[in-house]
Image (spheres, grey):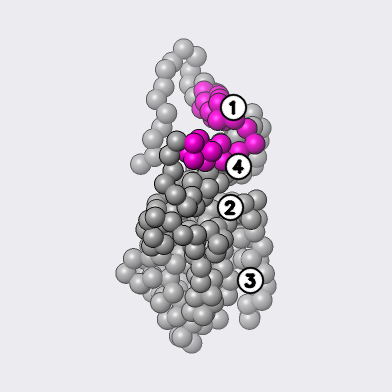
Amino acid sequence: MPKILLVEDNEMNQDMLSRRLQRKGYEVVIAVDGGQGVAMAHSLAPDLILMDMSLPVLDGWEATRQLKGAPATRDIPIIALTAHAMSGDREKAFEAGCDDYDTKPIELLRLLEKIQALLERKPA
Amino acid sequence: MSDARAETDQDITTPNLFGAAALRALRHELRTPINHIIGCGEMLLDEAGDDDLPALVPDLEAICAAGDQLLALMTTASTQPTPIGGSDRQRACRGPSPISSKERAGLVSRAFTRARSSTSPAGTATTPARPG
């Protein structure tokens, strides 16, 4: 069962997305801020990370930069999630090292396609 | 549907009286709870389908559709170049909805009535559960 780390500070978003992903067969672990997300990525070695970008403590861009800069976590695919497609957000996410990008409200089928594509691409 | 839900760069850069930063914050504050309505509705739709509860599906679809309409209405209203009032507000409230506001309200009201009656013992009044 692929393990997904969901880095999201909003409790309702955590609940909705984790329940829906679990029903699709994924194991979901949750971090509530960017700092915890970086720590959990190191300790749990998830198969993929869903990263909200507006986070307390350490925002999603900086957390992504740290994860992509560390040998132990740089190969973990990261999908950026934002509540609104601000001008430049997409480019910022890719510049930080995100492998893909999606906007809220989440369309589950679209997100599942992106998750699956990145999991298949991930080096063994 | 993804195109309808996504904001565009043009939306973000539309001149307005509030300024770009304030408008961005306003949209974020409004979009978040609407996203919750849509997300919860879709999650419950998934669960109704998986748990073989087809009777719930039409009402949940109505709630999701109302959420989409609300999101579109919010986007329309928050990109008005002038303060919304009078006829502008009436036009915004008509928004992109294919149904009238009365029909929309009726759909949502019937959905909640059915949900309450399907989860309550006969003749027992209930208060809708509130999120924690």
Q: Residue at x 44, y 74 (%)?
A: A61
Q: Amino acid at mark 3?
A: Leu
Mark 4–mark 1 Cα distance, whole angstroms, equals 14 Å
Residue at the spot of label 4: B96
Q: Chain of mark 3?
A: A
Q: Residue at x 49, y 82 (%)?
A: A68
Q: Residue at x 53, y 28 (%)?
A: B105
Mark 3–mark 4 Cα distance, whole angstroms, equals 38 Å
Residue at the spot of label 1: B103
Main structural element of the magenta stretch: helix, strand or loop?
helix
Q: Chain of mark 2?
A: B
Mark 2–mark 3 Cα distance, whole angstroms, equals 26 Å
Q: Which label sits on residue A119?
A: 3
Q: Secondary structure at mark 4?
A: loop
Q: Earlier in the sequence, mark 4 or mark 2?
A: 2
Q: Amino acid at mark 1?
A: Glu
Point out the frontmost of discs 1 and 3: 1
Mark 3 surroundings within 10 Å by alpha-carbon count, few (fewer than 14), some (14 through 19), many (20 or more): some
Point out the frontmost of discs 2 and 3: 2
Q: Amino acid at mark 2?
A: Arg
Residue B53 lies, in percent from the top left, at 63, 33
B98 drawn magenta: yes
Q: Residue at x 62, y 66 (%)?
A: A115
Point out the frontmost of discs 4 and 2: 4
Residue at the spot of label 2: B5
Mark 4 surroundings within 10 Å by alpha-carbon count, few (fewer than 14), some (14 through 19), many (20 or more): few
Q: Secondary structure at mark 2?
A: helix
